[in-house]
């Protein structure tokens, strides 16, 4: 079935993003096609195909014509090829498109209602769908829409289209970045904007488009990067705080706040939401980007309440908006460099010279990515060598040979995301297998992704390249045999160390620098026997009364996003109790 252009001006359809529907049952295909046309025909080009082979060819034609494909929907039960397998083919052709498996509508109890996959007929019938979800073959499943308006169906479609539009080049970017294609500072700026959910467009300075924007900005390219803001203001290699100030997130609170939270990862964001919702004057301080390490994760699939998964950036953005709506003051003001107890609370000193006063403080600074020591890596940072799951670089690595160093969940998530674009992704693990530190669902998904390979017992011995990464020397730790392989990018995710070197000596830390709290403090169970606090500490309180810690920075914490969120909320409750008791004593 070809798209109906009768109601579309000639040539207009080619500029619209495509929604493709594939199914070999004529009645079901017509119903799905009709449901989509009634709702989306003005803004999208609806293409329906009855044969998966023809649909794949059509996708190739669209890609060759540079026509964007927003979504591909396939019937789960087709005679020639299972729908999930067709969607795997579609991903290889058009990796940016959202992939939706359309399952038969109805179930044993209520055949005319919206029924989730676990109730589809029986467990055996649901198994292929569940497998497709587990292995990352699809982005979502949907029961076929009913004959009437099906708002639950369209809500999911709309959410997926919103995600696709967010990942695609923004129509109205807030920032245009012009920098050399392989530029460490350019990468840093793109990463910060991506993690703060600020839409931008990047132009390589050496490209014709980049040169055009430099001329328009009145720059000759001698100083890069250049940022052209949505207001028309031109910034030349601005410090991060100046970029934050341009978007109104660099101001500090005036006067004394009830609670200052240092670090806007999951723990800090959670505490900010709960504190502000309770009416406490709340200041949230972040050095560079909301979300912490979790904010750089391409997809968190095991976070409660998000069955399709959610990107770390999206989760952080939602939490940011939630905290802001309750009245929290959110500031990307650079690193906090000092914490000093004073009468009535604490002074927090900032790297740029500013300071804030708070009655209580939560340390939620998380951890920093551990650096990989190998000759040649440092000189190529940002020019093919990246620390963290760099969502901002994934599209730029289309068709390239990419390596991921690390064996935990963050490395697995990065590999799966990069495989959408890269020709080949290879995970490098020092240990014997991924099973030691990675969740089984990710191991299964990696095993089912044809362009992801795993090399165990392997370390990086050296990196080579002139101006950009070109090759890696890999050494087998068991045999000692070294091999030099071509490489366009290396993403390093080999663990992390806590950000606690700025804390005063009164705050107890373990041998690795993690903040000790509660019953783990020396003498905490018996204040009379030399405890560091004059009373039993709150479970998340540090050795300095009124200062608390939550999330990855805390000694003994579970290094999971959900755990950090939970600790943030618990810390808020305990800090509220501290403030109430301190007010009574005062």
Image (cartoon, rainbow, N blue to C red):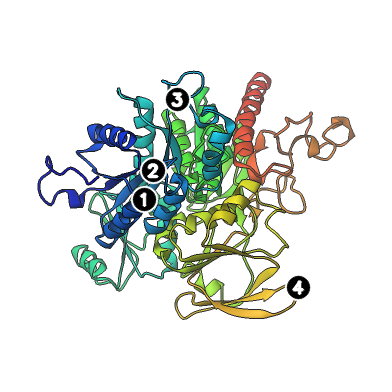
**Labels 4 and 1: the sequence-earlier one:** 1
Q: Which residue is mark 3?
A: 106
Q: Which residue is mark 1?
A: 52
- Which image quadrant is residue 340 in? top right
* Residue 518 position in % (x across, y down): 76, 35
* Residue 131 position in % (x across, y down): 56, 43
Q: CA distance from mark 4 to mark 1?
A: 46 Å
Q: CA distance from mark 2 to mark 4?
A: 46 Å
- For label 4, the crowd category at 10 Å Cα-Cα, with few meaning under 14, some 14 to 19 and many 20 or more, is few
Q: Secondary structure at mark 1?
A: helix
Could you tell me if the residues under marks 2 and 3 are in contact, i.e. CB atoms within 8 Å?
Answer: no
Q: CA distance from mark 3 to mark 4?
A: 55 Å
**Labels 2 and 1: the sequence-earlier one:** 1
**Labels 3 and 1: the sequence-earlier one:** 1
Q: Nearer the viewer, mark 3 or mark 4?
A: 3
Q: Which residue is mark 2?
A: 74
Could you tell me if the residues under marks 2 and 1 are in contact, i.e. CB atoms within 8 Å?
Answer: yes
Q: Which residue is mark 4?
A: 478
Q: CA distance from mark 3 to mark 1?
A: 25 Å
**Labels 3 and 4: the sequence-earlier one:** 3
Q: Residue at x 73, y 30 (%)?
A: 538
Which quadrant is the C terminus positioned in? top right
* Residue 498 position in % (x across, y down): 65, 52
Q: CA distance from mark 2 to mark 1?
A: 9 Å
């Amino acid at each position: 079935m070809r798209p109906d252009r009768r109601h579309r001006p000639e040539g207009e359809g080619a500029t619209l993003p495509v929604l493709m529907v594939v199914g070999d049952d004529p009645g079901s295909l017509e119903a799905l096609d009709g449901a989509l046309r009634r709702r989306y025909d003005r803004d999208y080009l609806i293409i329906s195909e009855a044969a998966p082979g023809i649909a794949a060819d059509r996708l190739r034609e669209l890609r060759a014509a540079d026509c964007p494909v927003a979504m591909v929907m396939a019937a789960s039960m087709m005679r020639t090829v299972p729908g999930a397998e067709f969607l795997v083919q579609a991903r290889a052709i058009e990796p940016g498109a959202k992939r939706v498996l359309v399952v038969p509508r109805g179930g044993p109890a209520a055949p005319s209602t919206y029924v989730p996959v676990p109730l589809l007929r029986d467990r055996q019938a649901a198994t292929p769908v569940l497998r497709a979800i587990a292995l990352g073959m699809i982005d979502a499943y949907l029961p076929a829409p009913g004959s009437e308006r099906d708002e639950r169906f369209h809500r999911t479609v709309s959410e997926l289209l919103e995600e696709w539009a967010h990942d695609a080049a923004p129509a109205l970017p807030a920032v245009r970045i012009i920098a050399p294609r392989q530029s460490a500072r350019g990468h840093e700026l793109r990463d910060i904007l991506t993690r703060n959910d600020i839409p931008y467009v990047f132009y390589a300075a050496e490209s014709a488009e980049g040169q055009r924007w430099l001329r328009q900005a009145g720059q000759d390219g001698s100083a890069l990067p250049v940022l052209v803001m949505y207001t028309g203001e031109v910034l030349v290699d601005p410090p991060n705080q100046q970029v934050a100030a341009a978007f109104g997130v660099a101001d500090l609170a005036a006067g004394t706040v009830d609670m200052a939270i240092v670090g806007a990862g999951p723990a800090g964001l959670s505490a900010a939401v709960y504190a502000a919702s309770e009416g406490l004057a709340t200041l949230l301080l972040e050095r560079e980007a909301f979300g912490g390490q979790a904010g750089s994760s391409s997809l968190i699939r095991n976070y409660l309440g998000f069955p399709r998964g959610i990107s770390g950036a999206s989760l952080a953005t939602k939490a940011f908006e939630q905290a802001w709506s309750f009245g929290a003051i959110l500031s990307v003001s650079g690193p906090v460099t000092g914490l000093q107890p004073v009468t009535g609370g604490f002074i927090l000193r900032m790297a740029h010279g500013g300071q804030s006063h708070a009655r209580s403080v939560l340390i939620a600074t998380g951890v920093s990515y551990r650096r990989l020591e190998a000759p040649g890596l440092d000189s190529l940072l940002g020019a093919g060598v990246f620390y963290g799951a760099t969502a901002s670089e994934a599209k730029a690595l289309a068709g390239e040979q990419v390596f991921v160093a690390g064996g935990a969940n963050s490395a697995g998530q990065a590999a799966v995301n990069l495989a959408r674009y890269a020709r080949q992704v290879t995970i490098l693990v020092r240990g014997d297998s991924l099973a030691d530190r990675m969740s089984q669902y990710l191991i299964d998904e990696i095993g089912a992704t044809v362009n992801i390979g795993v090399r165990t017992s392997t370390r990086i011995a050296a990196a080579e390249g002139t101006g950009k990464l070109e090759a890696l020397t890999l050494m087998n730790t068991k045999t000692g045999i070294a091999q030099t392989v071509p490489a366009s990018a290396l993403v390093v995710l080999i663990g992390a160390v806590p950000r606690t070197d700025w804390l005063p000596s009164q705050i107890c830390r373990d041998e690795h620098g993690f903040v000790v709290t509660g019953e783990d403090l020396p003498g905490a169970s018996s204040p009379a026997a030399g405890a560091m606090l004059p009373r039993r500490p709150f479970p998340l309180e540090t050795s300095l009364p009124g200062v608390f810690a939550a999330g990855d920075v805390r000694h003994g914490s579970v290094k999971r996003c959900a755990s950090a969120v939970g600790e943030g909320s618990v810390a808020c409750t305990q800090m509220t109790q501290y403030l109430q008791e301190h007010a009574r004593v005062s």
